[in-house]
Each structure stands twice: as structure tokens, then as C-alpha cells.
Image (cartoon, rainbow, N blue to C red):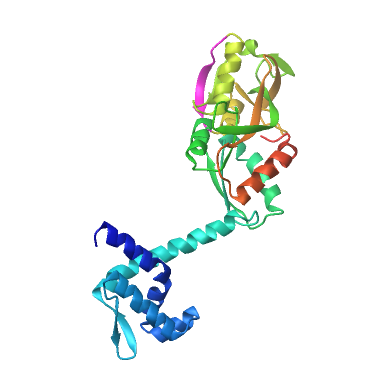
Amino acid sequence: MDELSTADGLDALAPLLRLFASAAAHEHVTRAAAELGLPQPTVSRRLERMQRELGATLLERTGRGVRLTRAGALLLPRVRRALDELELGLAEIAAAGSPEHGRVALAFLPTLGAQVVPALIRGFRADHPRVRFTLMQDPSAVVLSRLREGAVDLALTSPLPSGPGLRSQVLHVQPLVLLVPEDHPLAGRRSVALAEAAGESFVGFKHGIGLRQITDELCRAAGFEPELAFEGEDADTVRGLVAVGLGVAVLPRQRRRRPGTAALAITDPPAARTLGLVWRSSALEPAVVAAFRDFVLAEGARLTAGLT
């Protein structure tokens, strides 16, 4: 077929895909008609018209049944794929309109995976048990890149981004502390000016992780560049290395003190991490994504207060 006849062929074929696929599967027009709930003469006429308009014989009679011709055998796998894609698309449309079904793709910082994200998902699924989640744990730069590219629907991150294309809302502000080994000279103190840690080795995070950016900015505000003894990706690893004396670290305050460490409030400069939810301002959201976003914005601050 040339370009024009291909378009004409699509016009003829599209409404009749299920008829052809059913007749090919049953190798019988009457059985196909019964499956489709149509009179057998109607199915026969439509199949004949389809083949006439396509200019190709797709089915040939064999006694009381039918079988695929070479042209029909070439076309059938593509027809089945097209029907599968249409069925999937219709299912996605149905899910997009319901906040009770579907999937939410959420990206978040590694430091939020232990407590914050589980608390939010547990709270939402209490009323939406059929909703599923695709979760991606990455540094803040990757989290925001995934969001901009459309790979995820929502992102939990810190610090919150600025610029066009994204919207965000603060969930809460986490106080940051200087975590030191329990036998450190500062361990008996309740608070510290960060400048007092200028000569310390720091256990920190790799570039691209939000806490690394925050730590660097706080140390510069205190008048020094931190000397890093280790750069990691996981907050629990950082806490463990502080506990064995590798260095000190700037981290969110925990409800429970890590054994072997002491947490000192940072009084100067003001030290906190702003945690928030980010989404694309121009995205057409499925209902389930909007429902989870609205839940997090309404309940997230309460559910995650004091968590890290």
C-alpha cells in the first residue's frame, strides 16, 4: 500500500479489529459472533467488507471454519498488540479518574526513607488501600531531575527548588544538630556555635545530596570550609561513623539518641532543614496523584513532625 491507501486501510480496519482477532482465534465466524454478542451474518458481512476495502484476503473458508491467509497471519500479531494497547489505555484512563486506584511515583531523599516516607504512605493507604507506589530514592539533584523529566509524579526533598516549572510546599522545618562522639570535648554541652567545630573532621554526604549543600553553606556562614573525613549517602552510616570517632556531622535531630553520640543544638548560624513536597506546575495529574499530594500537604506536617 502507498501512503494514501495505508491511511484508508486504517480507516477500514480500526473498527473491526476485535472481529478479525476473534474470528482468527476461534477459526470460526459463528463462534466469534457468539463471543462478541453479534449476529453471525453481521460479523460475516463486516469481515467481507473489511477485506474488500483493504484489498487483501485475510481469512479463507475451510469447510465450516476459517483460517488465516498469509496476509492475515502477517496482520494478526499487530492487531493483537493494538487491542492490548487500547485495553491498557482504557484501564489507565479509568484509573486516572479514580483516587482509589492507580499508582503514584514518588522520589525522595535517602535520609527520608527510614521514617518520613513510610509514615506518609501508611497514613494515605489507611483510606486508599488499593493505591500502589513506585518509589525512587536518590540525592536531591537526581530527585528533581526525575521530577522535571516526568519520571516521577512527586518529590520529597530538601532544600526546596526555585525557578519555573515546579511548585512546592513546606511540610516542616527540621532543626539540625552537630553530632559528636560521646567522648568528644563538646559532648557535655547542650549547644554550640558551629565556628567551634572549625578544626574538626566532618563525616558528611556526597555532592548532590541536600544535607551536603546545607552543611557546606552553614560552615561557610560560620567562617570555614569543612574538612571531610568521609562522604556518604546514608544518614545511618554517617551517625555510625560519628559514634566510632571518625568525625562530627551536621544532621537532623532524632527523637532517640544514637548510642555513642551526643547531639548539640547549633545556635549560630541558625541551622535547619526545610523539608517539602515538590510537583510539576504544568502536569496533568491522575486523580490518585492529586489525592496523595493533597493528603501530604494537609497531613504531612503532623505525620512527619519529629521524624528524620
Residue 124 point in image, percent of width and height: 69, 49
| The one of 140 and 252 positioned closer to us in this rendering | 140
Which SS does the magenta portion mostly show?
strand
Residue under the image location 50 percent in, 30 percent down: 141
Residue 126 point in image, percent of width and height: 71, 53
On the question of residue 115 being in view, the answer is: no
Which quarter of the figure has residue 79? Answer: bottom left
- Viewport quadrant of the N terminus: bottom left
Q: Is residue 92 left or right of residue 300?
A: left
Measured along the vertical axis of the image, is residue 265 above or below residue 292?
A: above
Count of residue discs:
0
Residue 296 point in image, percent of width and height: 68, 41
Measured along the vertical axis of the image, is residue 138 above or below residue 9?
A: above
- Residues in magenta? 224-233
- Viewport quadrant of the C terminus: top right
Which quarter of the figure has residue 195? Answer: top right
Residue 99 point in image, percent of width and height: 65, 53
Residue under the image location 49 percent in, 43 percent down: 151
Q: Is residue 3 left or right of residue 306?
A: left
Residue under the image location 73 percent in, 35 percent down: 305
On the question of residue 111 being in view, the answer is: yes
Residue 49 within the segment the image draws in magenta? no
